[in-house]
Image (cartoon, coloured by chain):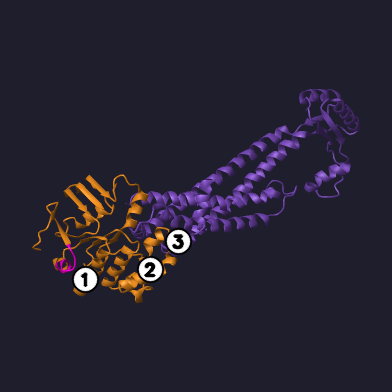
Amino acid sequence: MNALARSLNVLRGDGQAGRVVPPTGHTAWLTQFTAGAMAFLAVFALALSLATDRLAELWSSELARSATVRVSAPAGQEEAQVRAAVRVLEQTPGIAAVRVLDAAEERALLEPWFGPDLPVEALPIPRMIDVVEGSDGYDAEGLRLRLAAEAPGAVLDDHTRWRQPLVKAAGRLRTLGVVSILLIGTATAAMITLAANAALAANAQVIRVLRLVGARDVYIARAFVRRFTLRALSGALAGTLLGMGAIALLPGASTEGGFLTGLGFQGAHWLIPLVIPLLAAIVAFWATRMAALRSLRGLM
Amino acid sequence: MIELDDVSYSYGGGELLSGISLTLPPGSFFFLTGPSGAGKTTFLKLCYGELLPTAGRITAFGQDMRGRGRDDIARLRQRIGVVHQDCKFLDHLPVAENVALPLTVAGRDAASETANLSELLGWVGLSGHADALPPELSGGERQRAAVARAVIMAPEIVIADEPTGNVDWDMSLRLLTLLVELNRMGKTILIATHDLNLIRAAKQQVQARVLRISNRNLQQAGADL
């Protein structure tokens, strides 16, 4: 708390401490620009992390609780096999609901691929049974064996087969997003350290004079720290807002678009990127302070 | 106020000063003389803590220089006014702000001391130049501004390194008068100079002692100077 109060005190702006260091033309703009660019990238890395997080969650919860039984049998036997399969499913412990998809629903599922007005009845497509799992789960292997015996044309697809790699990929993507944010943060710190060192070197004469007339190290450091912290804060704020704007303009999440349109923030998550400018300011504060105090130690 | 006890200072290879002992009592007026490169500036830097002795002990205001932290050194410099050889100003700030710089960096409100500041600028004859930038001043004006900056914190000691180095004889006498006035106000004055005429002029106004650096040692110069 004390350290926080001290840090804020530094920013509160001793105009005089700022004035003793001569203004620097274009380098100020460069620091702001870089902080802004980094913040812009950080917004996207954050959006990627949050979106993949949501997807992984979705895939592992919703899909895990549903399964499909596909019945393909020669015409004539089909109806009997569907009934047999439903009977088996209803008797299986751990299954909460069983529902046979009607022709209209199957047509809706196929519509994105074959267009409307598909004569589903005329095609040898399998019948689908939607299965919702109960909270305790069921014995998939046992169910497969029983289905094979009662309805040979029925195949259980419990989604795990294709769900697992997707969840894994989403997890990897999220890790990549987090690593990117960390890299952006350290790159910002490195960039600001370099800029601060350049400013300190350019103002070596000013620093020597200040030290000779009795300025303490923190006073001299403050003039630089304040400047770079405010530059990083304003640059990162602009970059963050632009990044958030760009994300807001992306097409909205939709089932047709799938994964790609899910990239964005939802609800309260829109507040998270606002932390980026603050983090940038904190990074700039410490990077400049450390650079300034380090260079001052070489001077009596 | 400042005591040197068997102080030596060596740069990388050779020894520049060795075995120097001296006490600067309050209210005294000292000249430091000697050939160029004899170590006058080094001696002064030892006195205000820009350099630490390689051997021996320097005490300022009763505290050992070596034991001082960096903030302690900063506070020491607020009590010792220094007129540097090349003045050392912040060229982007006007003269008035440069003169008030010790107040500013000490965290004192320079705005509340504007009356003092303008009085001080009047004393050194720079009232008309308060808003000028240091590069716009002549050599003598810069030296007088440096004197004003050295005394704005009301220090107990004023150290001047060749204050008349770049100015003509009239201006030298004017600067000397300023320093003599400070001494009459009770300040300890230590001036490094190679200008013997200046020392002679001073001796007519004040009880000045002359120290001479030669052969790495400090000697009290004779009264015959």
Residue occupied by mark 2: B116
Residue B159 image point, x, y percent: 25, 60
Question: Which chain is tinted orange?
Answer: B
**Which residue occupies 61% across, 39% down?**
A172
**Mark 2 or 1: the one toward you:** 2
User: Who's the residue at 18% across and 55% down the image?
Assistant: B39
Per the image, the residue denoted by label 1 is B172
Q: Which chain is purple?
A: A
Name the residue rendered at 67%, 37% in the picture.
Answer: A167
Which residue is label 3 attached to? A18
Label 3: which secondary element: helix
Q: Secondary structure at mark 2?
A: helix
Q: Nearer the viewer, residue A145 or B155?
A: B155
Question: Label 3: chain?
Answer: A
Marks 2 and 1 on same chain: yes
Along the viewing direction, whichever of A61 and B212 lies nearer the viewer: B212
Residue B54 appears anywhere in the view: no
Tell me the CA gap for discs 2 and 3.
24 Å
